[in-house]
Image: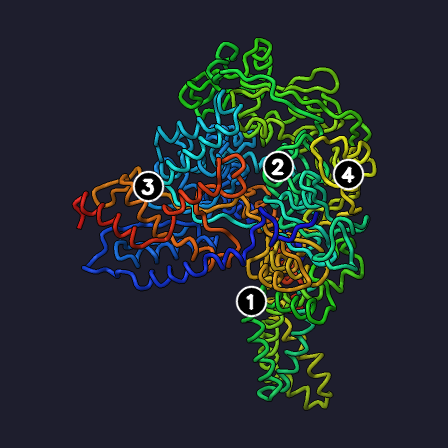
């Protein structure tokens, strides 16, 4: 199969996956009690049950589940993701405003993870079982174990309250692409990238160490190649394959982690929006965010698959 | 006039409060621990307490009650927790009354004393908020109705107070529910902010704090002085107030928003005919004066002749696009195919015939300008009422309002459906729209997006900029009507001559920061000047520091447990009021306030908080003297009552 057919096939598979995701999410939201109308009026003694029903009917929340799903699906196919019931905002507008914030945060965290993890992993592999390796193993274990909400709070405490290099609230007057915003991405980016960095570092080290034991490394060394070339040109390239796989999988956990990190750092992204949407049972918003996240993760995995071919031309897609 | 919260009459000083309760509270803990732990075998009574798991304070409170019950030796207890939405669905179900469980929930009351008794106890509130256990006491229903509705009480505040006193006594004797405490709300500022005082509702923190001549309240910015040492004679104009609010501003469209942050954000821009001080007294605001002109002995049934029939489907949804003002009390939309309702035109007809409960006349100020230059007239009031038709607030608005009518440019009549002591407050409770925006579809008054519509009102601040989930900004309205007219136009104002006729701070810059600890950190880091809704631990810290000012006031929030009178059986004779009184004596109110809420609340010695005292009792002190003994933590009294119950019901 050619690479182009492979990509096409994978892109087409998005459709059934998203369909499945939408059915499951829609049912889950409806299986949990409560809806936006209940949020609005349930605790208001002045609103009778009849008035509540009337309100529910006005927002189309009174039909059977399948009917509501079909209506929703029909609208989505025409590009209409509906409105946020509590605030009347347009769902696609909300997602489009919030998405870049989360992508910026995710990319920064991801990049931070790779920049920290790959060199440390290499260094640990070369100095296997020495102090540097043990230290990196300790750091990696800590990185994986520290919950990111706690790390976030600590970074705010130290970075903002103690040394005062960052503000607690990111400035909201700059557009996201303003170069200054890079600075404000540092703390939330570190928070989100730490766990990723830790796991990438471990995989980098292991696969690198494994490669180092292979015969072609001995051959390369025997040939008289400088150690630097052996490691960076031959070993690194071969050991990156497992890192790429992991980095793609980590996209999902970075997206999930952004939910907590955005709340702690008051970062107005999709994750913070998602939490509110779930609290308020804003079905349209929950659905849209889930679908967008789904597409995002599928594409990240697809990119990883394509990268394999670049890293190792022997890989065939069939 | 600047008041420190330790001197103010309404503001409660937490420390003083604690000193008062401290001694008793320690005794209470001792009493608990040394209880008659299960003298002979198994406890006689079993109680299952229920609570939503996501409210830590509430869960801890229920745990304290449970421990206290068990320590008495008479009770075994169990606590069930539920996710909030699950819990609400569970306890508001009609069947829940039969379960025999004791639910715990919190409500938010208003200046209306009814909000502390009617919602919990009136039989019509069973199956909705918040008579969870199906209390059905016709004598109490009548007492509650008579304290608010009827020709006599609607024109006589003293009679109303007397009737509420009867309600409180009846409730104390029957103890269907135990209210544990009333919340304090607190606002925190840094030392740049002067003159700040907290309003009993957090949505009023800015609208009230910035400028409220009815209480001689005004706020200003001054970095060079200590706010503890300044008063209004030191006032400086100008500056920017940086604040943080605890949730997104979901909507700038008043009839289409139901959350407190939206109201908070709208109150910079929109105003009402009347305004309230922090005790709930009303003052003419956009209206120069107002008067109750006529009261008639009318019931909702009397509108029958004017009603129109509309179809109802199986689920009780009525087939009409018009606002339903009154539904025929005898028709049931779920069971009947047709329901008789009073629509706006019908209401007008009824009013023309002289069929209405009350008529209020409002004389409007001349020369009030909206931010877009429109001049405020009676037409605006009528158009605003119509914009509330079929809105998200229709239920609250049209449960009392019958009809609005203009008489010339500067007089408006508002009609109440029936004689109602709360009509004076409720009828004018709408935010006046400009004509430019009065025809907007629901939810279209929204500044977001490319074709956003910025809110226009008569208020002291003009909307300037809003970024969803991020910030909202306002600038001072340079043509504010009250400044143009002068405070001397307000007959009720008796403050100093140089008191400003409008707020003095130029710019308001509000960040949207949902996370409590982030708001607290931002205040510490000098990124904001004012915020609210912080954890009690943070409040303690700010209160102890000289760099911040914490102002707190008793608010409308309260928590209660309810006794399942409907499910009485041989083992749990819930219908015996002595059992309920006994449990009430075991509710450790002081411990709850001290240990769960760090003192940032007040034990509910009566069911009436300070907030609603003005309308809810003849004499608050006398009421407390009378009711408090019923609500004291008193294991001995409880044991006595329980022994009687055990004997009379032949329990082991």
In percent of width and height, residue A276 lies at: 58, 48
For label 1, the SS is loop
Residue located beneath label 1 in the image: A147
Residue located beneath label 3 in the image: B564
For label 4, the SS is loop
Residue located beneath label 2 in the image: B257
Q: Chain of mark 4?
A: B
Q: CA distance from mark 2 to mark 3?
A: 34 Å
First in sequence, mark 2 or 4: give its number.
Answer: 2
For label 2, the SS is loop
Q: Quadrant of the N terminus of chain A?
A: bottom right
Q: CA distance from mark 3 to mark 1?
A: 43 Å
Q: Are marks 2 and 4 in contact (CB under 8 Å)?
A: no
For the residues beneath circles 4 and 3, the answer to whether they share a chain is yes
Q: Nearer the viewer, mark 2 or mark 4?
A: 4
In percent of width and height, residue B399 lies at: 53, 26
For the residues beneath circles 1 and 2, the answer to whether they share a chain is no
For label 3, the SS is loop
Residue located beneath label 4 in the image: B501
First in sequence, mark 2 or 3: give its number.
Answer: 2
């Amino acid at each position: 199969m050619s690479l182009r057919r492979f990509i096409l096939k994978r892109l087409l598979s998005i459709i059934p996956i998203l369909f499945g995701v939408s059915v499951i999410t829609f049912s889950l939201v409806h299986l949990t009690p409560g809806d936006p109308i209940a949020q609005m009026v349930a605790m208001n003694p002045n609103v009778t049950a009849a008035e509540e029903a009337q309100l529910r009917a006005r927002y189309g929340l009174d039909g059977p589940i399948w009917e509501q799903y079909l209506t929703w699906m029909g609208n989505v196919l025409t590009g209409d993701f509906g409105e946020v019931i509590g605030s009347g905002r347009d769902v696609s507008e909300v997602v489009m405003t919030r998405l870049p914030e989360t992508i910026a945060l995710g990319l920064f965290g991801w990049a931070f993870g790779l920049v920290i993890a790959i060199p440390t992993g290499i260094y640990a592999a070369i100095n296997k079982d020495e102090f540097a390796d043990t230290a990196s193993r300790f750091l990696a274990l800590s990185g994986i174990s520290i919950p990111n909400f706690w790390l976030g709070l600590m970074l705010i405490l130290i970075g903002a309250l103690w040394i005062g290099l960052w503000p607690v609230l990111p400035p909201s007057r700059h557009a996201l692409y303003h170069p200054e915003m890079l600075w404000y991405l540092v703390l939330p980016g570190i928070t989100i990238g730490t766990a990723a960095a830790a796991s990438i570092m471990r995989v980098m080290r292991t696969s690198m160490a494994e490669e180092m034991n292979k015969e072609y490394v001995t051959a390369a060394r025997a040939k008289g190649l400088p150690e630097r070339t052996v490691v960076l040109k031959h070993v690194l390239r071969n050991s990156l394959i497992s890192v790429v796989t992991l980095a793609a999988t980590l996209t999902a956990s970075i997206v999930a982690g952004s939910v907590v990190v955005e709340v702690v750092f008051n970062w107005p992204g999709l994750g913070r929006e998602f939490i509110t949407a779930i609290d308020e049972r804003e079905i349209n918003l929950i659905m849209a965010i889930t679908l967008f996240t789904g597409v995002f993760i599928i594409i990240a995995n697809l990119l990883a698959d394509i990268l394999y071919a670049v890293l190792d031309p022997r890989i065939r897609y069939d | 006039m600047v008041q420190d919260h330790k001197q103010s009459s309404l503001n409660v000083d937490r420390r003083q409060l604690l000193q008062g309760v401290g001694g008793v509270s320690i005794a209470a803990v001792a009493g608990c621990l040394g209880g008659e732990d299960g003298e002979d075998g198994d406890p006689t009574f079993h109680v299952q307490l229920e609570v939503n798991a996501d409210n830590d304070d509430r869960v801890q409170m229920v745990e304290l009650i449970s421990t206290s019950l068990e320590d008495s030796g008479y009770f075994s207890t169990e606590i069930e927790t539920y996710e909030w939405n699950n819990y609400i669905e569970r306890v508001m179900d009609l069947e829940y009354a039969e379960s025999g469980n004791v639910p715990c929930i919190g409500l938010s009351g208003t200046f209306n004393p009814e909000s502390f008794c009617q919602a919990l106890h009136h039989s019509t509130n069973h199956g909705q908020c918040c008579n969870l256990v199906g209390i059905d006491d016709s004598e109490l229903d009548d007492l509650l109705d008579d304290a608010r509705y009827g020709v006599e009480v609607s024109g006589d505040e003293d009679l109303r107070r007397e009737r509420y006193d009867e309600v409180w006594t009846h409730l104390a004797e029957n103890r269907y529910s135990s209210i544990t405490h009333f919340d304090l709300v607190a606002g925190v500022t840094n030392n740049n902010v002067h003159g700040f005082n907290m309003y009993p509702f957090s949505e009023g923190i800015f609208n009230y704090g910035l400028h409220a001549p009815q209480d001689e309240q005004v706020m200003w910015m001054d970095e060079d002085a200590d706010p503890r040492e300044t008063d209004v004679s030191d006032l400086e104009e100008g500056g920017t107030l940086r604040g943080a609010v605890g949730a997104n501003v979901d909507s700038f469209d008043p009839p289409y928003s139901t959350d407190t942050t939206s109201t908070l954000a709208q109150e910079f821009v929109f105003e009402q005919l009347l305004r309230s001080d922090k005790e709930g007294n009303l003052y003419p605001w956009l209206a120069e004066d107002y008067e109750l002109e006529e009261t008639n002995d009318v019931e909702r049934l009397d509108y029958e002749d004017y009603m129109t029939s509309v179809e109802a489907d199986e689920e009780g949804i009525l087939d009409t696009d018009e606002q339903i003002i009154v539904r025929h009390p005898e028709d049931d939309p779920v069971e009947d195919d047709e329901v008789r309702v009073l629509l706006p035109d019908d209401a007008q007809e009824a009013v023309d015939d002289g069929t209405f409960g009350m008529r209020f006349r409002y004389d409007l100020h001349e020369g009030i300008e909206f931010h877009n230059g429109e001049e405020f007239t009676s037409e605006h009031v009528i158009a605003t009422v119509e914009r509330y038709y079929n809105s998200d607030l229709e239920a609250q608005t049209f449960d009392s309002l019958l009809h609005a009518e203009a008489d010339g440019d500067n007089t408006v009549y508002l009609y109440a459906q029936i004689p109602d002591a709360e009509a004076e407050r409720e009828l004018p409770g709408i935010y006046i729209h400009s004509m430019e925006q009065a025809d907007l579809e629901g939810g279209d008054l929204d500044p977001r997006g490319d074709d956003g519509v910025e809110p226009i009102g008569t208020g002291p601040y003009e909307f300037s900029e809003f970024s969803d989930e991020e910030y909202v900004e306002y600038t001072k309205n340079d043509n504010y009507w009250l400044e143009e007219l002068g405070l001397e136009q307000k007959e009720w104002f008796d403050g100093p001559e140089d008191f400003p006729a409008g707020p003095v701070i130029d710019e308001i810059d509000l960040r949207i920061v949902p996370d409590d600890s982030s708001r607290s950190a931002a205040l510490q880091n000098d990124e904001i000047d004012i915020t609210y809704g912080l954890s009690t631990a943070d409040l303690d810290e700010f209160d102890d520091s000289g760099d911040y000012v914490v102002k707190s006031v008793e608010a409308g929030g309260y928590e209660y447990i309810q006794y399942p009178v409907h499910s009485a059986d041989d083992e749990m004779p819930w219908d015996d009021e002595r059992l309920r009184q006994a449990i009430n004596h075991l509710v450790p109110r002081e411990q709850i306030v001290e240990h769960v809420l760090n003192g940032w609340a007040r034990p509910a010695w009566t069911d009436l908080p300070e907030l609603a005292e003005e309308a809810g009792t003849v004499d608050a002190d006398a009421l407390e003297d009378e009711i408090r003994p019923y609500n004291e933590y008193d294991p001995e009294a409880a044991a006595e009552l329980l022994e009687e119950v055990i004997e009379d019901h032949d329990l082991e």
